[in-house]
């Protein structure tokens, strides 16, 4: 009768020339994770780690959104200042062009002239 023995493990390799190293195998070699965690990561560390990662993502997203909002507010403030300057300029031009002397100058080429005499009041008696 033969003795019980372990099966020999067949090593799978992606390329026939040798073992191909991936990013995760390189990280595992450099960090030596098995030294302090053993053969695998305990399941009990999963939920607290994912909760902390979730809070970190919310924090990063919040800061990113706040920075974008600040940039947008500054852009809008600059646009409001430009529009306010344009409105002030247009109001000044309108006030100048609506003066009686300016209107008289503009309608003079059309043959319309300004009356120098005051209007006459007509009284009607019954």
Image (cartoon, helix red, strand yellow):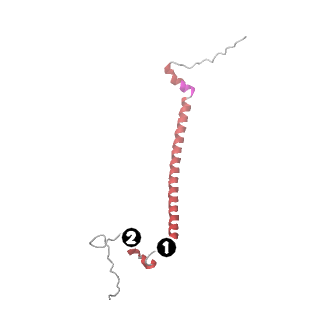
Q: Position of residue 121 (x, y in %)?
A: 66, 16
Looking at the image, residue 97 lies above or below residue 18: above
Q: Position of residue 49 (x, y in %)?
A: 50, 69
Callout in the foreground (1, 2): 1
Count neighbours of disc 1 (C-alpha within 10 A) and say few if under 14, some if 14 to 19, many if 20 or more: few
Identify the residue shown where x is 50% and y is 54%.
Answer: 68
> Does residue 26 appear left or right of residue 123 in this picture?
left
Q: Helix, strand, or loop for circle 1?
A: helix
Per the rendered image, the range of residues in magenta is 99-103
Identify the residue shown where x is 53% and y is 35%.
Answer: 90
For the stretch drawn in magenta, what is the main secondary structure? helix
Q: Position of residue 55 (x, y in %)?
A: 53, 64
Tally the numbered discs: 2
Identify the residue shown where x is 57% and y is 26%.
Answer: 100
Looking at the image, residue 79 lies above or below residue 22: above
Q: Which mark is residue 24?
A: 2
Looking at the image, residue 117 lies above or below residue 68: above
Q: Which residue is mark 1?
A: 43
């Amino acid at each position: 009768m033969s003795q019980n023995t372990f099966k020999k493990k067949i090593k799978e390799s992606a390329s026939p020339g040798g073992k191909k190293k991936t990013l995760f195998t390189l990280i595992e070699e450099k960090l030596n994770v098995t030294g302090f965690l053993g053969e695998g990561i305990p399941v009990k560390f999963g939920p607290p780690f994912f909760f902390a990662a979730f809070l970190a993502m919310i924090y990063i997203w919040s800061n990113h959104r706040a920075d974008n909002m600040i940039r947008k507010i500054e852009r809008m403030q600059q646009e409001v200042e430009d529009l306010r300057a344009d409105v002030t300029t247009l109001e000044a031009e309108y006030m100048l062009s609506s003066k009686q002397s300016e209107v008289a100058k503009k309608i003079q080429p059309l043959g319309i002239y300004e009356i120098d005499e005051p209007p006459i009041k007509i009284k009607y008696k019954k």
